[in-house]
Amino acid sequence: MKILVLFLSVFAITSCFAQTAAAPSDPALTQILPGILLPTKLSKSLDAKKAKAGDKLEFKTTMDMLSNGKVVIPRDSKIEGHVTSAKSHSKDSPDSEIGIAFDRILIKNGRELPIKAAIQAIAPPLIISVDAPGTPAGIGGAPPGQQSGNVGSAEAPGTAMTSSPQIASMAAPRSAPQTGPGGALTSASRGAINMKGDVLSATKETNVISSSTQNVHLDGGMQLMLKTE
């Protein structure tokens, strides 16, 4: 009888351990690979007259980013950055510019990851039109050409987000529509859109919005389509 009881106890413990080991855990984002498109918006207005190098900047993601069907970067996640350069417009020096770099993204459970990104496109704040009661048009969906599920790395621990295989329109011709419903940026958007006189020059180190005719001013809510590098 003692042998039988001991055998059953060992079997129960072994089964419990096996079930615990096999239980799937939530994916934890460990890195952000190059080629991800991150639709974001500027949290507060930015003006070349007031800004100075080193000023902290805050951006928010505008859609959920998925890996293996699970949200790893929720909508409204904060992206921190800083001003790299600022030059105001004047009669004697008409050229104006604001330089921006991205530092880190804050994700679920207080975790953060470093991020390097170039601004692929920038446009004025989104115009929200309501198709049905409480349903903004053009909000909450993936940019055309980008699937809602980004592919995670099954070999590495945690999850490495990559969306390059899903972004068919990255090589879209320049004649492709630059904005979607309500003026929303899409994966085909390039440069400074609907920003008269402004020019965008973008690299992962610094992104410069410049103008030779007016002072550069970015309103709060300004749309940015970031491409990670």
Image: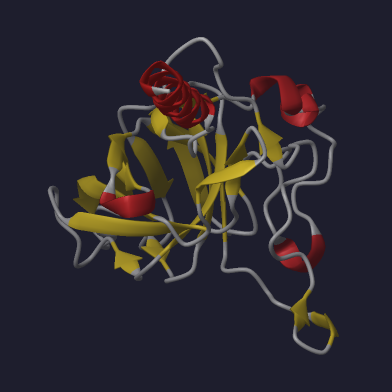
On the picture, is 88 further left or further right than 149? Answer: left
Residue at image point 30% right, 66% down = 47
Task: Please tell me which residue lies in front, 188 or 40.
Answer: 40
Whether residue 229 is visible, yes or no, is no
Whether residue 204 is visible, yes or no, is yes
* Image vertical order of residue 54 relative to residue 67, above or below: below
Farthest residue in the bottom direction? 133
> Which image quadrant: the N terminus?
top left
Could you say where residue 194 lies in the image, as x and y percent from the top left? 64, 59
Farthest residue in the top direction? 155
Task: Please tell me which residue lies in front, 15 or 38.
Answer: 15
Could you say where residue 69 lies in the image, as x and y percent from the top left? 67, 39
Task: Please tell me which residue lies in front, 154 or 176.
Answer: 154
Task: Please tell me which residue lies in front, 196 or 26.
Answer: 26
Residue at image point 57% right, 68% down = 125
Residue at image point 35% right, 70% down = 45
> Which image quadrant: the C terminus?
top left
Dividing the picture into quadrants, the one containing residue 116 is top left
Could you say where residue 207 lies in the image, as x and y percent from the top left? 37, 38
Dividing the picture into quadrants, the one containing residue 188 is top right
Residue at image point 22% right, 48% down = 82
On the picture, is 33 further left or further right than 81? Answer: right
On the picture, is 54 further left or further right than 134? Answer: left
